[in-house]
Amino acid sequence: MKNNHWWKNAVVYQIYPKSFQDSNNDGVGDLQGIISRLDYLQKLGVDILWLNPIYESPQVDNGYDISDYRAINPTLGTMADFDQLLAAVHQRGMKLVMDLVVNHTSDQHRWFVAAKQGHDNPYRDFYIWRDGKDGHAPNNWGSYFSGPAWKYDPASDQYYLHLFAPEQPDLNWANPKVRTAVYEMMNWWADKGVDGFRMDVINLISKPQGLPDGPQSADEKYATVEGFVPNGPRVHDYLREMNRHVMSKHRMITVGETPGVTPTDAQRYANLDNQELNMVFQFEHMNLDANPNPALGKWYDQKPCLTDLRANLSKWQTELAGTAWNSLYWNNHDQPRVVSRFGDVSTEDYRVKSAKMLATMTHFMQGTPYIYEGEEIGMTNAGFTRLADYVDLESLNAYHQLVEEQGLVDGPTMLKYLAMHSRDNARTPMQWDGSANAGFSTHQPWEKVMANYRRINVDNALADPNSIFYYYQRLIRLRHTMPVITDGAYALVVGNEDDPAVFAYTRHDQETTLLVILNYTAQPLERHYDIPDTAERLISNYHDDQGDTLRPYEAKVYQY
Ligand code: GLC
């Protein structure tokens, strides 16, 4: 077997190419920009780079609408740039993971262009077409991006399914030709030397049999597909088939983005037997707070309470142990910035302390840590206050639907939630230095640079030995050198289950015990834990140790 869990103690760094580094000064990040920053990433110590989609795309959803799977988006560079990037990554001993977006294509993909030509076109069945029902869409499904999940095509008098934007038609995975085409494409990239794939919404590829109506509450215009479309009847067959045709043939790493999965689902998707994927991105810890206003659903209101967060993280630690593998993340291009959401940006000191505390929480757990660009310097939410500053279509569609069309939320309230939750919060340009546009570009960037870039930037982080950057660097090194972090058993400290303010857990193997103590709040607290005299403090976000006194956001890890 080629896949021997080589990735188990690896740390992944996620690059959002459009926002990372612009090299040709058109305001958009690019592949040469990434190449120019590889030394920085090597210094951080990460093993694997995951790039958000860099393929040819009309960019309706920032590259998640792919029009050619084997071409590079010209704004980002050429295939020669890509080959150069891949070689440069490998030369530094790192690996490169691509985004695989195969639940849907762009409506400009040649398969869809052909499919639209009529019922008889050989590509028609690459997508999901249905007749309307009494002059309406074939069923009541709503899209993830607001509005219906079906679009009417007058030329053929049929509707096609799009779980995301209308420009992102869903592929018909029930058609074996679709699957073969996808596997061939994956092997083509693997043969080029790509080291793996992050698979976009991969648990949506198998649709419920017969595409029935979904449950719809009285105040919903469409049924919320999140509740019943994921984990369809044939998804595991497809992934096993994909594994046989692709993954088993290469030494690669795969992570499936799988919204709505439980630990039981993950035991199938990411079982250590290597039949499907290596690990999943699950979202439970990102969705702990429902908003009190039902129309706002996932647009939460405040930071999750520690009791819920700890119970959730612990559940995943315990239920996957020994059988399956999870990813460990706080951030990605779809989530607001962790330090603004779970941490504290009210003072500079708290920003730094809480960012390190949160990093400690996940980096000592079992799983594969993912660091999203800018997280390692504690970048914050953009918190835009004007609708005009938003670029992301999910945010704009939600505003239009909830405020303008349905009147379920008033404008100022919606802006308040977007400032906390919009995906644009994570997509602002990487802050490299204090020069114009944060050193990202000399041209005006495609998305606004945050006002705090003169304070929060890579230059400052590298110059300060106490920076968040160097803390992450140490966390990564510890994972590489201490097997207990990868394989040790996880346990909550007895009595910690209901502590509203402190999270305390251990990792343990035959030689070593690690005790992780985290003050999740800005309050100074007293807590007593039994720590052997021989224990050493392995890492902390404070210089000294005050024993049972825990200072604001204090994080410390003992080894014994
Ligand atoms: C995933 C991506 C997100 C994209 C969506 C549709 O959730 O992470 O950015 O909009 O899939 O492809």
Image (tube, helix red, strand yellow):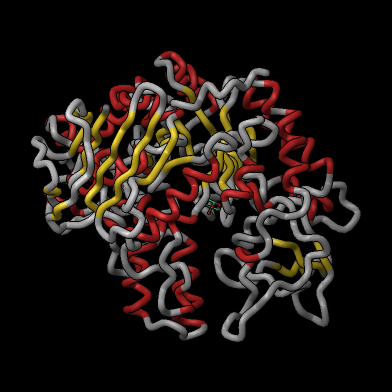
Q: Residue at x 68, y 47 (%)?
A: 109
Give how far across and how far down residue 555 sits, in percent. 21, 43
**Residue farthest along the right direction in this orientation:** 120
Give how far across and how far down residue 248 sits, in percent. 69, 24
Q: How many marks?
A: 0
Is 473 displayed left or right of 464 in the figure? right
Query: Which is more toward the observer, 8 or 129?
Result: 8
Q: Is residue 55 visible?
A: no
Give how far across and how far down residue 155 sits, in percent. 80, 66
Quarter of the image holding residue 516? top left
Quarter of the image holding residue 423? bottom left
Give how far across and how far down residue 284 sits, in percent. 48, 56
Q: Residue at x 78, y 69 (%)?
A: 212
Q: Is residue 493 visible?
A: yes
Which of the image's four quarters has the C terminus? top left
Query: Which is more toward the observer, 550 or 357?
Result: 550
Q: Residue at x 52, y 38 (%)?
A: 321
425 w.r.t. 123: above or below: below
Is 337 displayed left or right of 108 in the figure? left
Q: Residue at x 59, y 25 (%)?
A: 252
